[in-house]
Image (cartoon, rainbow, N blue to C red):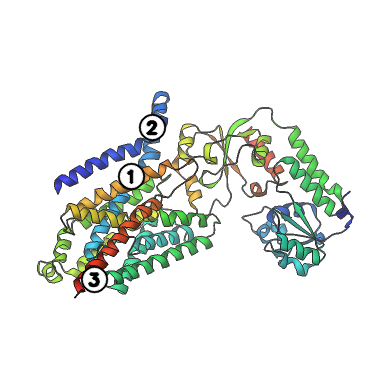
Amino acid sequence: MPAFALLIGARIASLNLCTDEYLLLLARPREIASVSFLSQDRAESPLWQQARRYPANRGSIEDVLTRRPDVMLTMGGGGRATRLIAARLDIRPVELKAPNSLDDVAINLRTVAALLGEPRRAAPWLDKLAQLQRSRPATSKDALWLSGGGQMLAPGSIGAQWLRLAGLSQRGLPGGRADLETMLVRPPAVLVVSNYRSAQVSSGQRWLDHPIVRQAKARRLTAEGRRWTCLGPLMIGEIERLRAAAR
Amino acid sequence: MNRSIALLSAALVVLMVVHLVVPLAPLLELRRTDPGLATLLLTEIRMPRTLLAAGYGAVLGTTGAALQATFANPLASPDITGSSSGAALGAVLGGYWLGISDPLALAAFGAGGAGLALVALLLLAGRRSDSAALLLAGVAIALAAGAATSLLLALAPSPFAFYDSFEWLMGSFVDRSLAQAAAALIPAGLACALLARRARALDLLALGEDVAASLGFPPRRVALEVVALSAVAVGACVSVCGAIGFVGLIAPYAARRVSRGHPGRALLPAAPIGALLLVVADLAVRFAPAGRVIPVGMLTTIVGTPLLIWLVTGMRRTTTRRFAP
């Protein structure tokens, strides 16, 4: 058992949208010292209502100092200075791994539950994840998961691994981007379009409104874009939904 | 001159066809397997890009020639007067902040921005100002409008909007629809046709304001008409493709070689020359490495800057010679 598991009743501050997700799903209210401001944004996180009950930080250790957390959760590193300050103030910095596989998601779930002093809190999520993997459809349909501008999931990435659990296999394209000619000439069997900030104007969003994309000869599904930013445990419900829709 | 225009137009048609069919392999493949799809590919995806490249080039040539004749200055192109940057600012304000999605309404915002920039130029530098005053006022307007565009994009609701500043400030024809092409080119084409009818007035203006006035072309009115029509034409194109520099400077310069120095008569040849330049530039950016996008305006700027330097140093030489003892 890692040493930090002994911190019974630890108060945790999360500095990152993706670490917020684990914390909000596993912690009890009094165990949460702070979450990042992004989680409180309706456009960024499905957990925004829950996140608004806690003080927000802008991803910097300075914002959470006065909350006196025991643990500071980051992902993708906070820089050397941040770690030094944390050590001086007796805040334990814990860095979750940006997941490259579904196993990484499971490891992060276990890590955060252990930090909270109650490893079994991860169990329901781990069970659901395992169940989803066991029931993986044997065959998969040719699919393209797209967001604005034709940006797509890379085949083999964790996003594509999640998609495969829904029975969809992400196609690879040169340049990592779908272009209009591909959409017209070789449309996928299933087109999964992210609705991430789809009501807001950008050239990428305009690309999705091009007649060729709108009328592509493909079955069309909508991905709940916010869940695909972190590709963490919130994906479990999303994949169950997509799997049912793609059937 | 007519023969030159005919030759230029013929060359333009050939290059537009090349622009339309390159890359050829997917077209040939589709024509074998699914001819209907090949037609769709040509009309829905490639045609808008070709039309926009040629049309925007022609607009830059015509408006550049008209502005240069009006301001009696070879530097008064849509980009250097700040009207392209003003148009981009107007379109960004309308599209990203006011949520306007109708391409024609966006074109109106572009035209409004371009018009305001030109009015600001008239106020700052005046219509018959020397080159330095015009250049400085234009650069100031262009820089301010460019910075304001970037600021609006940085603060826009969508966090992706800021990445678009590249496209707004440098221009691109990629992945536009036929509807967008129509929204840009129909108003711009009408405005340019009306501009072309001012060719004689602009030629007379070059002989002196009194000459023009005595023959029934009040200089002030001609200038205001040129400014308004140029704003509509440039604004409509910028609202769909972003700002593209230097074509509006180079094309009129070359066109005056064809028109033997007549600034008004240069309007007609400036259109095919501008179109040729942009079609060639847009053909060239297709050879970028896969997955990388080079904005077409970057290429025109790189090619056009030496000409600007040459024009400015040439002006300085003639000025010093004139005043030398």
Q: Chain of mark 2?
A: B
Please name the residue that numbered disc 1 is placed on.
Answer: B280
> Mark 2 = which residue?
B24
Q: Determine the CA span between mark 1 and mark 3.
A: 37 Å
Secondary structure of the residue carrying tag 2 is: loop
The mark lying in front, picked from 3 and 2, is: 3
Please state the chain letter of the residue tagged with numbered disc 1 in the rendered image: B
Q: Position of residue B242 (x, y in %)?
A: 40, 54
Where residue B17 appears, as percent x and y from the top left, is 31, 37
Judged from the image, the secondary structure of the residue bearing numbered disc 3 is helix
| Vertical position of residue B274 compared to residue B23: above or below | below
Q: Is residue B149 left or right of residue B280?
A: right
Name above or below for residue A107 compared with residue B246.
above
Query: What is the three-letter code of the residue carrying label 2?
Result: Leu
**Marked residue nearer the N-terminal end (2 or 1):** 2
Nearest to the observer: residue A222 or residue B142: B142
Q: Which mark is residue A181?
A: none
**Which numbered mark, 2 or 1, is in the foreground of this view?**
1
Q: Amino acid at mark 1?
A: Val
> Disc 3 residue type?
Thr
